[in-house]
């Protein structure tokens, strides 16, 4: 029996878990905090990464960018569009935002994928079999956020 797409989405599983834990990343299961292999859907003006099902924005720390430039001096972060990157060290932060201005949010809440360390897999190419959609436009995710808010 095959899994449904929602069960295969790493992002949906992670974001559901952080809402179930009251927005506290420290309470998220350690099993879910492993390196994430992602595909860069867009690198400018937003840096969007996808797990093949949903896309979310990635927010890089200053340290992550510095480390990347030291290790991969010949590669610009904007050039990672359509490439695979591995997020070695990352965290999730729950933020209040204006959903009229931030398209990667719902009900004035955004979970930010904060990248502390990453590396590109420049030789690996992915050909997504489906077009990834905004995680915040998924009906199940909207229900989870509404439940969290009320």
Image: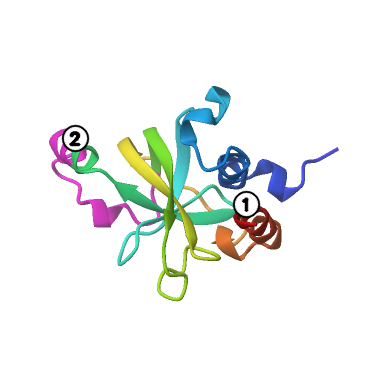
Q: Is residue 4 above or below residue 104?
A: above
Report the label total: 2
> Where's the C terminus, which quadrant?
bottom right
Quick one: label 2, few (<14), some, or many (20+) residues within 10 Å? some
Q: Circle 2 sits on which residue?
A: 67
Circles 2 and 1: CB atoms closer than 8 Å: no
Which mark's residue is nearer the viewer, 2 or 1? 1
- Magenta-drawn stretch contains 69: yes
Is label 1 in a helix, a strand or a loop?
helix
| Left or right for 126, reference 139 | left
The residue located at (41%, 37%) in the rendering is 91
Disc 2 to disc 1, C-alpha distance:
36 Å
- Magenta-drawn stretch contains 76: yes
Q: Which mark is residue 148?
A: 1
Residue 136, percent from left and from top: 57, 61
The residue located at (40%, 74%) in the rendering is 101
Magenta part of the chain? 66-84
Q: Which mark is residue 57?
A: none
Is label 2 in a helix, a strand or a loop?
helix
* Residue sitting nearer the eye, 141 or 69: 141
| Left or right for 103, reference 18 | left
Q: Mark 2 vs mark 1: which is more N-terminal?
A: 2
């Amino acid at each position: 029996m095959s899994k449904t797409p929602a069960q295969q989405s790493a992002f949906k599983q992670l974001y559901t878990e952080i809402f179930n834990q009251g927005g506290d990343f420290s309470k998220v299961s350690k099993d879910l905090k492993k390196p994430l292999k992602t595909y860069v859907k867009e690198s400018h003006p937003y840096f969007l990464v996808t797990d093949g099902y949903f896309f979310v924005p990635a927010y890089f720390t200053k340290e992550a960018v510095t480390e990347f430039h030291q290790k991969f001096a010949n590669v610009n972060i904007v050039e990672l569009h359509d490439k695979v990157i591995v997020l070695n060290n990352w965290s999730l932060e729950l933020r209040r935002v204006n959903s009229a201005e931030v398209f990667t949010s719902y009900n004035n809440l955004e979970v930010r994928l904060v990248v502390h360390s990453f590396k590109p897999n420049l030789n690996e190419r992915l050909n997504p079999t489906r077009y990834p959609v905004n995680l915040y436009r998924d009906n199940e995710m909207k229900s989870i956020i509404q439940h969290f808010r009320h």
